Image (cartoon, rainbow, N blue to C red):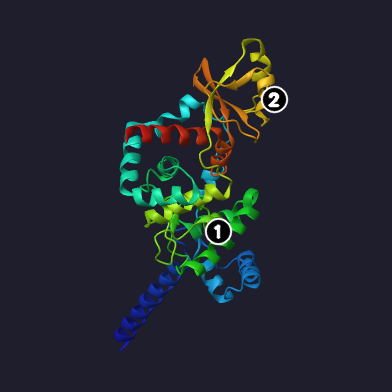
Amino acid sequence: MRRSTLVVTIAFALVAGGLASYAVAQRTPDPKRGVPYGPRDDVRAFAAEVAAETGLDRRSVERWLAAARFQPQIVTLMSKPIVEPPKWFEYAPPFLSADRIAGGVAWWRANEDALERAEAKWGVPPEIVVAIVGIETSYGRLTGSFRVIDALATLAFDYPRRAPFFRGELKEFLLLSGEQGFTPLVPKGSFAGAMGVPQFMPGSFRRYAVDFDGDARIDLWGSAADVVGSVANYLARHDWQPGGQTIVPAAIADEHRDAVLRRLDGGTSERRPLAAWTGDGVGPAALVEPVDEPVGLLMLEESPSDASYWIAYPNFYVITRYNRSRLYASAVITLAEAIRAAR
């Protein structure tokens, strides 16, 4: 009798120990998956705020946010020390490689109908759309590996420097999921929450993405037509001028050169009427249609000891609305020209 009692006692202890271990395992976050946001008071308060402001079901918002997980590597990526920006000759080569150009030619051929329709509707040349897609995600091959809700929650609740911006984007993302009929726990994107082939943030997705294939939904991951239409619409909504110039080589009179170059700050100048530039000895080196809008001067470092200078027209600045970098916009334009020439 004593022996059977001892056996039962040991068995019970083993089971109890197993259950306790299971409970601990359930409470202990998997470090590979990150720490869940569900228990945090600030997250619950945000869920209530979003529900009140948007009409989304509060329980659903709480459930989605409870499933979001803190990703420390995202904070690390966002917190990298600020270094001196690269020069043009350092920045450009990866975006102007033979493979990138060939990929652009192939993507253009595969999506020619959508690109032609987009140009007819919005006036944006096909090569500009193709180049943006090529630079953003290598024509859809690299759209990001982070769950968007994890990225946005991490930056909204654990990256104070940009928390207001990312809280806004998290709210936009939850609204977007309802509008487009997907669960917010599935989409993947960049570590900053940019989504799909064109890398739209949720707010831009809601404002500028379009259904261009006529299936009554917007798919920036799987529908090339929606990607084309959305990029073209984005540029058009930021005042793209159909038929307008982007950049044109600048001619600078020798006697004005030093004074003109002092106007450059980080590789670009302020925008001024073309007549004002002409009065200072600067003008386009090629014959182009005059424009009424102000234009700027752009410098591109061709080597450590040499640079080229360009008149930057309004469409150049439209591209910088996609990414606020003179190097990015210049790479888009240069890649676009290379792709068109290679067709």
> Which structural element holds mark 1?
helix
Choose mark 2 or mark 1, whichever is in front: 2
- Name the quadrant of the C terminus: top left
What's under tag 1, amino acid-wise?
Answer: Ala
The residue that mark 2 highlights is: 276
Q: Nearer the viewer, residue 239 or 165?
A: 239
The residue that mark 1 highlights is: 153
Instruction: Determine whether 195 is above or below 287 in the image.
Output: below
Q: Which x, y percent locates residue 257?
A: 64, 14
At 37% from the left and 45% from the top, the residue drawn is 139
Instruction: Determine whether 342 is above or below 249 in the image.
Output: below
At 60% from the left and 22% from the top, the residue drawn is 283
Within 10 Å of the Cα at label 1, are there few (<14), some (14-19), or many (20+) other Cα atoms?
A: many
Looking at the image, residue 258 sits to the left or right of residue 325; the answer is right
To which quarter of the image does residue 285 belong?
Answer: top right
Specify which label sits upstream in the sequence, 2 or 1: 1
What's under tag 2, amino acid-wise?
Answer: Ala
Q: Which x, y percent locates residue 43?
A: 61, 65
At 38% from the left and 52% from the top, the residue drawn is 114
